[in-house]
Amino acid sequence: MSSGTGASPPGVGRAEFALRVGDAGIAVQADLPEGLVKPAVLLPVLQNLSNFMTDLAVLQAGRQGHALSCREGCGACCRQAVPITPVEARVLVEWLETQPEDRRAVLRERFRKTAERLEEAGIAQEIRAAAGKGGRETTHALGLRYFALGMPCPFLEEERCTIHEIRPLRCREYLVVSPAERCAHPETKEIVGVKPPVMLSRILARWDENGGPQAEEIILLTMLDEWVAKHPASGAHAHRTSPELLQEFLRAFARDEERSG
Ligand code: SF4
């Protein structure tokens, strides 16, 4: 792994680094703002790296004789409870604000209806109670009850993700090699998934939105508004530069890769 800087416009620094995972490698170049920044500036880099991790997982599955079942136009997994990180939550809410008013209204209404159904089903309350404690069994049981409601993600249209380029890391990391029809029945536990060598979503979940360390936090994509209402943008200033954040990310990456390897 190496890093460095190159020529770039004023106020922007060029970050260059290379990562090796097993026998595969990737060289990354990114223009990042100079000065103190929030980790959201790294999100496009992490999204690209996440795609690379996904490719590696698919390759590995292929070597073991498994083909990926996930196809464009299949949105079965987009009815699951999708966990996102604080950094992604803030970025998505800001993105929503940039949308044309009529589009924003459509999306907001979907979020509102989803939140309403989660309250009616008693799931929202349980998710709040489980936050920060979440044993695996509790999380799994809640996930099944959520899925049973059959609610599509507010960003899903005609079984396609309408925010594909900026979709959360966890959406990128969810890969299935069992027959696609099984995805409609997670309760049977017959879904066979493949995991990327490093889950970047887990690294990002250990950062707060200002780049400080925190216990791994996940937020339900469909409860985004509630999280933002409880965590108004504090104006807390960023306290690290892009290279510092990048170095920290690379250290976390190396640690997680070592553990998974
Ligand atoms: S953000 Fe996109 S990929 Fe993720 S659950 Fe929603 S529709 Fe599916």
Image: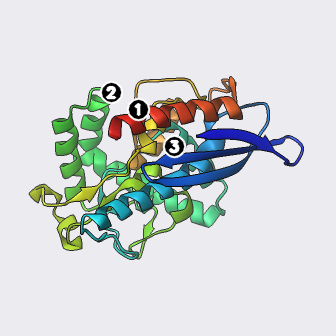
Question: Can residue 159 be seen?
Answer: yes
The extreme left residue here reads 188
Lower sequence index among marks 3 and 2: 3
Mark 3 and mark 1: Cα distance apart in space: 11 Å
Q: Residue at x 33, y 27 (%)?
A: 132
Image spot of residue 56 (x, y percent): 41, 58
Image spot of residue 168 (x, y percent): 47, 52
Say what amino acid the circle numbered 1 marks: Glu
For label 1, the residue is 217
Position of residue 128 relative to residue 59, above or below, is above
Q: In which quarter of the view is residue 105 placed? A: bottom right
Disc 3 crowd rating (10 Å Cα; few below 14, some 14-19, many 20+) is many
Lower sequence index among marks 2 and 1: 2
**134 or 128, which lies in front?**
134
Say what amino acid the circle numbered 3 marks: Ala
Asked whether disc 2 touches disc 1, contact meaning CB atoms under 8 Å apart, the reply is yes
Lower sequence index among marks 3 and 1: 3
**In the drawing, does residue 191 fall left or right of residue 73?**
left
Position of residue 101 relative to residue 134, above or below, is below
Image spot of residue 205 (x, y percent): 45, 35
For label 2, the residue is 132
Mark 2 and mark 1: Cα distance apart in space: 7 Å
For label 3, the residue is 89
| SS for dot 3 | helix
Q: In which quarter of the view is residue 96 placed? A: bottom right
Q: Residue at x 66, y 23 (%)?
A: 236
Q: Quadrant of ligand 1?
A: bottom left
Q: In which quarter of the view is residue 177 placed? A: bottom left
Q: Residue at x 9, y 59 (%)?
A: 188
